[in-house]
Image (tube, grey):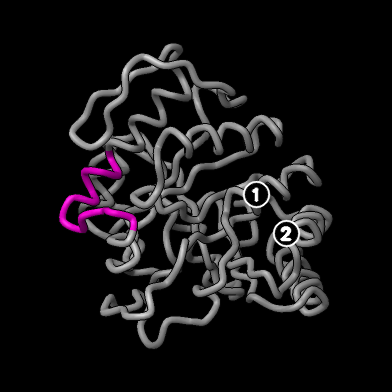
Amino acid sequence: MKFGISTFPNEDTIDPVSLARAVEERGFAALAVAEHTHIPASRESAYPLGGELPKIYYRTLDPFVTLAAAAAVTSEIELITGIALLIQRDPIITAKEAASIDVISGGRFVFGVGAGWNIEELRHHGTDPKTRGALLDERIEAIKVLWTQEPAEYHGRFVDFDASYQRPKPVRKPHPPILIGGDSDATVRRIIRHGAGWIANPLPIDHLSRRIEQIREGAGGDVPLCQFGTPVKPEYWQAAEELGFGQLNLLLPTKSRDVSLRLLDDYAEQVARYVG
């Protein structure tokens, strides 16, 4: 099992270049970053993990810009959107941004996507909450077409474009790995439909076990299992590994540069003891 780092990069914390270098220097396998375009001031959507919405959500840097900066100063770590809110993104532009990061990084991009939970946020992008699942499915399909075909065309209910040329194509063939976030029966169906993996939240182990069983039954076998926001608790790591997780991305709090570097040192020591 591999260990990466997941975080909510902000403009007043450790910068993406220093963060990416530090993650790679300490032997971690990946950097995963969250996305929120904005947080509406008036919001009724409940924070999925309960309680007040943490302040880090209000100031998150764009994940594609962040990962492009990280790609330019690293050579080994995977670069993961954890998760890109594709229901709020133009699929043609997103396909180009993602493929560009994959090219810049030499094939290290991983496309984590999801349908989102903040109803007010996605409505501001013109997305109907009632059809966001179908919209997500079409945008995933359309991006895969843009990555793998030339000319590429797609004709759906929500995404519709005629034969077009788009470059660059991703380095990794047939395309970068796709991980789908969420925790619902619809998420399970979406993972199976797209032949994708699951990028889970740090849910209780019993709950994860039931979901994974459901995914494997529908997929007819194992699928890639990844996690965003994993707590720094070796006993949790062990339980997740036994469930079949191939990668855990430990949650790095949104802190200053010096604090972040000290935390990464501590995480690296704990991971070394765990794997050793």
Nearest the viewer among 267 and 167 is 167
Residue 53, horizontal then vertical, whole percent? 42, 81
Instruction: Inspect the magenta stretch and tell me whether residue 81 lies in it.
Output: no
Q: Which amino acid type is marked by label 1?
A: Leu
Nearest the viewer among 164 and 70 is 164
User: Which residue does the image show at 26% across and 79% down from the upper left?
Assistant: 44
Residue 20 falls in image quadrant:
bottom right
For label 1, count other residues whose C-alpha is less than 10 Å away and answer few (under 14), some (14-19) or many (20+).
Answer: many
Q: Name the residue under label 2.
A: 16
Tell me if 131 is positioned left or right of 37 in this view: left
Label pair 2/1, CB-CB below 8 angstroms: yes
Please tell me the numbered disc located at residue 67.
Answer: 1
Q: Which residue lies furthest to the bottom in this view?
A: 51
What distance separates the C-alpha of mark 2 from that of mark 1? Answer: 8 Å
User: Which residue does the image show at 36% across and 63% down from the upper left?
Assistant: 208
For label 2, count other residues whose C-alpha is less than 10 Å away and answer few (under 14), some (14-19) or many (20+).
Answer: many
Residue 234, horizontal then vertical, whole percent? 60, 72
Quadrant location, the C terminus: bottom right
Instruction: Inspect the magenta stretch and tell me whether residue 129 lies in it.
Output: yes
Residue interval drawn in magenta: 125-137
In what element is the residue under mark 1? helix
User: Which residue does the image show at 25% across and 43% down from the upper left?
Assistant: 135
First-in-chain label (2 vs 1): 2
Q: Which amino acid type is marked by label 2?
A: Pro
Residue 223, horizontal then vertical, whole percent? 40, 41
